[in-house]
Image (cartoon, rainbow, N blue to C red):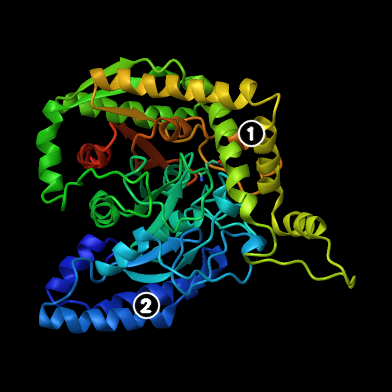
Amino acid sequence: MRWATFGSTRAALARGETTCEAVTTTFLRAIARKRHLNIYTYVDAEGALRTAREQDRQLATGEAPPLAGLVLAVKDVLCIRNWPVTCASRMLDGFNAVYDATAVARLRRQGAILIGRTNCDEFAMGSSNENSCYGPVLNPRNEIYAPGGSSGGSAAAVAAGLCHAALGTDTGGSIRQPAALCGVVGLKPTYGRVSRYGLVAFASSFDCIGPLTNSVEDAALILAAMAGVDERDATSAPVPVAPEPVGLTDAARCAGAALRVGVPKEFFGEGLDSTIRCSIEAILHRLRAAGAVVKDVAMPHTRYGIATYYILATAEASSNLGRYDGLRYGYRPAPDGRKRIDLHALYAQARSEGFGKEVKRRIMLGTYVLSSGYYDAYYAKAQRVRALIREDFDKAFQEVDALVTPVTPVPGIKLGSMINSPLKMYLSDIYTVTANLAGVPGLVIPIGAHASGLPIGLQLLGRPFDETHLFRLGELMMQLAKD
Ligand code: GLN
């Protein structure tokens, strides 16, 4: 793809070198060519071309919206009016959304061309995109590997050049981990930065919507377009976002001298792949040489992250997924010929047949930790540990402005290699879940590759609502990785 980023496409559009229609057509052709990767669950070629043509007319008269020409894919967990939304689950089979999610509506208004929906783990539960009723996505960088999850389709779509950018969701790492495994940029914004209205809920106190892109600049543009308070989501925050990150690159270079970056040793312990460790250390070395202060910080509660996350997230999921009863949405089991339908039997049948294995496992776990007699030992205790993890971040951010960490301990996930070991899969989320427990923003950037061709990502974690700082630092570090 000639203009892989929206930034470069926008410049080409301004110079009259291409049109929105031509760009959209190129992506549609690429989607058709790469169908075997199993990335899209739905493509709206006609709708996308219609919008593109309209934008070409608006560009000619100077009335185009600011993001005209941005070809965007959306994870199959966000509502888009009149499109199916399936969450990669049989449970939502045949269900069409009746309104746009706020994030989608805002991007659409600013000019995004919605091209299709991307595959993901069922109800966003998973780290490899293999828990999908559509089957797994193949990693475009090396097709015997998974793209990561749960926003695996979104990351793969961007990596394979099947859109400029894609929206994903991150409850415990689902934007950042697949971004790292596919070699793209991924942003999990601060909790509350982007309205969750129209996002099918997994764990409401964790869920965040964010972009996957081929540049930091594109991620910043998309965040600015969709962020902000929304009366339909009481947890959305009225904190203004810096508008366009103009001159991101120059600003980043100058910023080197004023940076204070923390390295939490708890993120570099046993189990971390040695190539990932070395690549990150090499960049930190260059960052120091560029004038930044790089120091060790302590995050002592990190080791409780996985247990805490998998108690609280499953508890919230068991409650959120209670609404799928086989009556109101999507899948309804075929009648078995009896005259009288027993309501409870219908619920049980719908939920047994509609949900996949992992989702059922989570509902059971979540129900267990919330049940009387166990609530204090698990749920209430996990809430207290969550507060301690948040405190670790508060303390660290008194000393430094951002943290640098790996994204995942493993270099890649071979298709089929972890799917039968859920615990192993859960443990691989160790470096991403604490950001969700604390609500802080995280930016993942590609910094290199393994010999297998699989990319290596680096994670930057920042203070709440300070995504701008992460963008500057991310831009700088991507340059340092290339130098
Ligand atoms: N891998 C984590 C899980 O399975 C995170 C999922 C997510 O962020 N949606 O819960």
Asked if residue 134 shows in the view, the reply is: no
Q: Quadrant of residue 100?
A: bottom left
Q: Is mark 1 within 8 Å of ligand 1?
A: no
- Residue 293 image position (x, y, % from top left): 19, 20
User: Counting other residues with Cα less than 10 Å from the Cα at mark 1, is it few (<14), some (14-19), or many (20 or more)?
Assistant: few
The correct choice, above or below, for 330 with respect to 177 in the image is below
Quadrant of the rendering where the N terminus is positioned: bottom left
Q: Position of residue 447 (x, y in %)?
A: 34, 40
Secondary structure beneath label 2: helix
Residue visible at 59% across and 27% down? 379
Q: Is residue 364 left or right of residue 29?
A: right
Disc 1 residue type (three-letter): Lys
List the residue tagged with mark 2: 48
Residue 259 visible in the shown view = yes
Q: Report the quarter where the C terminus lies.
A: top left
| Amino acid under disc 2 | Ala
- Position of 423 compared to 192: left or right? right
CA gap, disc 2 to disc 1?
A: 40 Å
Residue position marked by numbered label 1 in the rendering: 424
Residue 424's place in the image compared with 260, above or below, is below
Q: Position of residue 72 (x, y in %)?
A: 36, 65
